[in-house]
């Protein structure tokens, strides 16, 4: 019997390996992802997202769903602006990259041109809920058919209380040294002062 | 078939004949009848009409439809076109063909709803960010509103670039006979489009090139196609220019008034001829220079504070004196008014 400090590890079945000249990919990956990310200029075995970022998980879930449904050939992915502007590095589907906040509008044009296809507009919170609020509200209001819209909040890994679009540590570091909101600046909210600080993504 | 038709409606009749089946727009005077006609005719031919929540949204819907390879259009007037400039830059950067109609009204700001030609800089010289060009055609009649819209679709697809139909509230609102030849124009195959099919799965529409060398290469390629357009696509019309001492230059509704004024001037013994650019980009620089160099003086007339006249000056490069006469605010000069200006500028009268 093992002592309390010994951790027993279950035997892990060997996973299929994809090899290329430089890298060996050992984890299992949906076939909807490219085997190598050749659209990136380097480090083609890994994503460009920071460790802990939610995009990796969101990408994985979408790719697995598309694979399960067998709709890889029928899918058009609309990339937003922000880190996931490069979603087309990874997804082996038809890709369209659009302007900041306008994914629901572009997806409307795509979906109505290809009514029997799957059109996914992938947006971060700033893209969808700040600069693109009008587009998402009106796409919903029109009842655009079969259009998948995903909200991906950027600050999942932070313990700050989510305070609307764009509260992330990057915002604090790169644009607003004092913080983007009164909470972050450790100042009491003062009447009229909230509006002084524009909220903007740190990685445009 | 010969019919009485409004300029703005003729745009849509031309678009339907050109195989356009998608319209995304937002109404604005004096361009609203374009959207109205689209709402009427597009569903009849199995097409799509959507009234967007804004011009910002409509140009991005155009972006999406163009990405899927369909012939698509929108229309607006100055304030709406200002909102669309971001989208036009993205369309040009992603090399997406589409047709955008600008029925110009008075500006700046809210201005008024009367005709001006004050969007020339915004449409011909750019307006959105970055190095790109719009292909711009300038109808001067209801017939041309249909014909040049068809041409705009052809040019847009030929060069994978937005094409602008730049006209004024006068041409958009007036009614004239329109002759339409009912022939089916099949849009070209677009193997680059993203259609949600196995064949197009590897395709990508984007205007982002992070590496400096990649973006430079992309822009060099765009420059090369713009150069090809400049060599091949200039269109213009000359009227009584053979022996003219004074060449008057105007487009859109101004060219119509100038034409009548040229006839009157000729009756009075003044040797005046009209040069009318039909494409504003590419601008018929060589052609206007060749014509103007046979004359002694140039008079440019616009419903603006002097915008196209800059291209005439570049074309002539100081080789002939160039005068400008402009009316703004929605005022359109009369034949008599232009005749007086011609008399003042006649070389023999100086």
Image: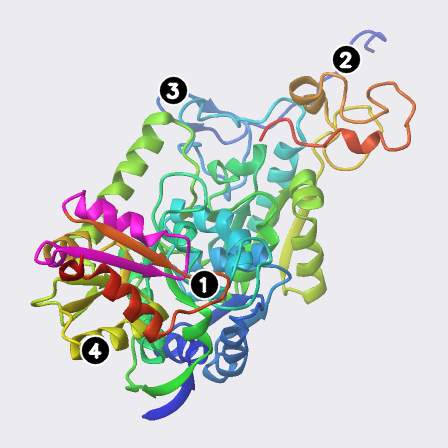
Which element is circle 1 on?
A: loop
Q: Which residue is mark 2?
A: A7
Q: Which residue is mark 3?
A: A22
Is residue B192 on the magenta stretch? no
Which element is circle 2 on?
A: loop
Q: Identify the residue shown where x is 31% and y is 93%.
A: B1
Q: Residues within 10 Å of mark 4 (few under 14, many from 20)?
A: many
Q: Position of residue B289 (x, y in %)?
A: 14, 53
Say whether marks 1 and 3 touch (CB < 8 Å).
no
Q: Identify the residue shown where x is 69% and y is 60%.
A: A138
Residue depth check, mark 4 versus mark 1: number of the one nearer the observer: 4
Q: Which residue is mark 1?
A: B116
N-term mark: 2 or 3: 2
Q: Is residue B250 visible?
A: yes
Say whether marks 2 and 3 touch (CB < 8 Å).
no
Q: Position of residue B85 (x, y in %)?
A: 49, 50
Residue depth check, mark 2 versus mark 3: number of the one nearer the observer: 3
Q: Is residue B313 above or below residue B247?
A: above
Tell me: B61 left or right of B125: right
Which contiguous range is marked in magenta? B291-319
Q: Residues within 10 Å of mark 2 (few under 14, many from 20)?
A: few
Q: CA distance from mark 4 to mark 2?
A: 100 Å
């Amino acid at each position: 019997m093992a002592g309390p400090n010994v951790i027993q590890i279950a035997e892990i079945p060997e996973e299929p390996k994809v090899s290329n000249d430089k890298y060996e990919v050992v984890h299992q990956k949906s076939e909807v992802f490219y085997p190598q990310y050749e659209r990136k200029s380097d480090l083609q075995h890994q994503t460009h997202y920071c460790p802990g970022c939610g995009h990796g998980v969101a990408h994985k879930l979408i790719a697995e769903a598309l694979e399960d449904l067998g709709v890889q050939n029928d899918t058009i992915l609309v990339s937003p602006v922000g880190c996931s502007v490069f979603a087309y590095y990874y997804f082996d589907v038809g890709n369209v990259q659009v302007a900041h906040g306008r994914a629901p509008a572009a997806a409307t044009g795509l979906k109505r041109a290809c009514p029997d296809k799957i059109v996914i507009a992938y947006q971060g919170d700033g893209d969808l809920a700040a600069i693109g609020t009008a587009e998402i509200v009106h796409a919903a209001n029109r009842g655009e058919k079969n259009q998948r819209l995903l909200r991906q909040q950027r600050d999942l890994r932070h313990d700050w209380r989510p305070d609307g679009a764009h509260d992330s540590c990057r915002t604090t570091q790169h644009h607003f040294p004092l913080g983007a909101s009164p909470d972050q600046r450790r100042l009491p909210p003062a009447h009229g002062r909230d509006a002084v600080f524009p909220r903007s993504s740190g990685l445009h | 078939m010969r019919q009485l038709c409004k300029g703005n409606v003729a745009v849509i009749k031309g678009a339907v004949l050109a195989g356009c089946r998608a319209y995304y727009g937002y109404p604005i005077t004096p361009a609203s009848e374009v959207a109205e006609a689209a709402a009427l005719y597009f569903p009849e031919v199995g097409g799509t009409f959507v009234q967007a929540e804004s011009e910002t949204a409509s140009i991005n819907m155009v972006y999406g439809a163009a990405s899927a390879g369909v012939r698509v259009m929108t229309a607006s007037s100055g304030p709406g076109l200002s909102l669309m400039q971001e989208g036009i830059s993205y369309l040009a950067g992603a090399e997406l063909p589409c047709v955008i109609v600008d029925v110009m009204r008075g500006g700046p700001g809210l201005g008024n709803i009367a005709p001006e030609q004050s969007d020339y800089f915004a449409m011909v010289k750019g307006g959105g960010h970055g190095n790109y060009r719009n292909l711009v055609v300038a109808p001067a009649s209801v017939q041309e509103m249909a014909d040049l819209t068809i041409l705009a679709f052809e040019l847009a697809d030929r060069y994978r670039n937005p094409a602008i139909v730049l006209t004024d509230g006068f041409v958009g609102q007036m009614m004239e006979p329109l002759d339409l030849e009912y022939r089916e124009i099949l849009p070209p195959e677009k193997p680059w489009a993203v259609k949600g099919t196995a064949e197009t799965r590897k395709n990508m529409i984007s205007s982002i090139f992070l590496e400096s060398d990649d973006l430079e290469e992309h822009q060099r390629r765009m420059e090369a196609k713009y150069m090809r357009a400049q060599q091949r696509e200039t269109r213009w019309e000359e009227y009584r220019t053979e022996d003219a001492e004074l060449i008057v230059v105007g487009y859109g509704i101004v060219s119509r008034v100038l034409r009548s004024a040229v006839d009157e001037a000729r009756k009075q013994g003044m040797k005046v001829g009209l040069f009318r650019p039909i494409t504003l980009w590419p601008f018929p620089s060589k052609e206007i220079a060749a014509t103007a160099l046979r004359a002694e003086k140039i008079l440019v007339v616009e419903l603006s504070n002097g915008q196209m006249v800059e291209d005439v000056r570049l074309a002539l490069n100081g080789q002939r004196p160039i005068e400008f006469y402009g009316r703004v605010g929605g005022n359109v000069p009369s034949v008599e008014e232009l005749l007086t200006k011609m008399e003042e500028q006649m070389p023999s009268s100086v």
